[in-house]
Image (cartoon, rainbow, N blue to C red):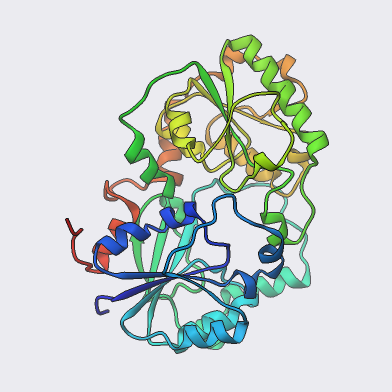
Amino acid sequence: MKRPRRIAFLSESPHNKRDHERFGIALLENRGVRVEVWDLTSVLQSRLASEYRPPDPFSWPGLRTFGSRREALDAIAELGEDDFVVSHLAFEPAVWDAYRALSKSRASYAIMSAGNLPSPQGTPPPLTPARVFNALYMRAPMRALGLRPAAFAIFVGGENASRKRNPIGRGTEEIWCHGYDYDLYLAAKDGAKRDGTAVFLDEYVPFHPDYLRRGHEPYSTAERYYPELRGFFDAFERATGLTVVVAAHPRSSYEKHPDYFGGRRVVRGRTVELVRDSDAVIAHSSTALAFAVLFRKPVVLAASADLRACPDGPLINAMARSLNKRLLDLAHPDQVDWKAELVVDETAYADFRRRYVKKDGTPEKPFWDIVADRLDLPQTRS
């Protein structure tokens, strides 16, 4: 593959500052390549596009949006051999035509293979015609689908990120990186200052925009969820002497809501520093638990009855198993042995890091520098 002159990210979420940084756009531009983000939200996720606005919208000259599906498909098909595409589009029947257009183009492309969460166990969801069709689509020969396999699979996470699935083919080359959060850890790891806090890793449970993408109702309501959460925090603070600070979910907009956290400090966009400086971390199953593992912070995992019963309940249980933690009940903090909870299982943490954060032996450098090295981009310009 020749060195690309342009890298285009295909996205189905509204572009924001967080994604701009996670895509490594400034780094890639500084390595001599033109970078664009093609925002396909309006044509692939119309409800998300119409009902959700990110709290940190971001625009720059390389952002391109599309008014129609035909316009987007034509633009993708016209990509040339000097282009390299990074696809953040789900590989599913609903976007077959986008991958078909990409296959018709002369551009090489990569898909992102994420594996930064433990695999749930338990009874699988019931089979439906749609699930059967999706499963067959994922396993169908690429030639039968009229598609060209990805040139690269870029692995996001630890060794469990490896998945042999479409659109990965026999000739697809693996680029092993790490979880995106590892870049933030590298930048923040040397500035710790303990401050007597415990950080709650918020998941924006009643309002998360992924509900719009998936087309279902929230797993809990604000009226049920937040009072239990406040009660749990109250009991934790009385027992430990620590002050709970809320690391707001990156896609949350708490400034538009009432005070759900009982006057506690709510901070968005500084999760890595909050975890680094804390004495403990409280969570359900947030991917930001990687920070707790990297900084070796004691973790308290808890969930409400709504969360334990929802489709993500098995994932919450899997996270608890992977860290060798007991999953606590938000409604019964009086039954917790807090001293027993505030410990670190070094073996479990090391295993979690290897499996879900960073595979052993991968480069100790920023995510997109690893990719840029493989693409033979010029070294960073001074």
Q: How many marks?
A: 0
Please identify the quadrant where the N terminus is shown.
bottom left
User: As drawn, is 158 to the left or to the right of 57?
Assistant: left
Between residue 299 and residue 4, name the one nearer to us.
4
Please identify the quadrant where the C terminus is shown.
bottom left
Classify 245 as above or below 173.
Answer: above
Residue 331 in the image: state x and y as whole percent: 77, 25
Q: Can residue 348 be seen at all in this image of the molecule?
A: no
User: As drawn, is 173 to the left or to the right of 64?
Assistant: left
Q: State the residue at coordinates (69%, 70%).
A: 46
Between residue 92 and residue 244, name the one nearer to us.
244
User: As drawn, is 182 to the left or to the right of 91?
Assistant: left
User: As drawn, is 193 to the left or to the right of 337?
Assistant: left
Between residue 94 and residue 315, name the one nearer to us.
94
Residue 84 in the image: state x and y as whole percent: 36, 75
Q: State the residue at coordinates (33%, 58%).
A: 26
Name of the residue lying farthest toward the right:
223
